[in-house]
Amino acid sequence: MTGHIVAQPDLTICDREPIHLLGAIQSFGFLLAVSADWLVSRASENLADHIGTPWSEA
């Protein structure tokens, strides 16, 4: 058996990771964004899989 050296991850840049720019929704979730007056402004294409309403009708 060979030994493995596991380096400690560098957590000093976690706050700068651009996770908000990935452009994808995880398979177990959906996106539904509303404006201040509760009008739907964004919806993911898989919305119907979760709530039964297609994104085009949200």
Image (cartoon, grey):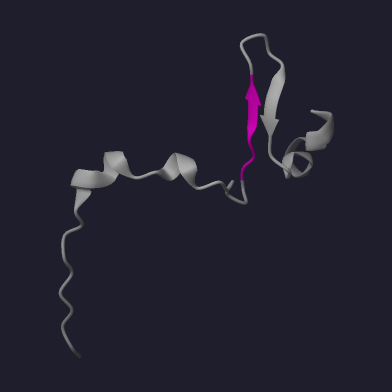
**Residue 41 point in image, percent of width and height:** 68, 24
Q: For residue 42, what is the image quadrant?
A: top right
Residue in view at x 16 percent, y 60 percent: 8
Can residue 17 be seen in the rendering of this structure?
Answer: yes
Q: Residue at x 16, y 65 (%)?
A: 7
The answer to whether 35 is drawn above or below residue 43 in the figure is: above
Q: Please report the residue visible at 72 percent of the width from the left and 16 percent of the height from the top.
A: 39
- Of 58 and 23, the residue lying toward us: 23
Left or right placement of residue 22 versus residue 43 in this view: left
As displayed, is residue 58 above or below residue 19?
above
From where the camera sits, is residue 52 visible?
no
Q: Image quadrant for the C terminus?
A: top right
Could you tell me which quadrant the N terminus lies in? bottom left
Quick check: is 54 in the magenta stretch? no
Q: In this view, does 13 lie to the left or right of 33?
A: left
Q: Position of residue 12 (x, y in %)?
A: 18, 45
Q: Looking at this view, name the residue that lies furthest to the top.
A: 37
Is 49 placed left or right of 20 in the picture? right
Indicate yes or no whether the magenta region holds residue 30: yes
Task: State the extent of the magenta-drawn residues as a range.
Answer: 29-34
In the depicted view, which residue is nearer to us: 42 or 8? 42
Indicate the quadrant where residue 13 lies.
top left
Coordinates of residue 26 in the picture (x, y in percent): 57, 49
33 and 27: which is toward the camera = 33
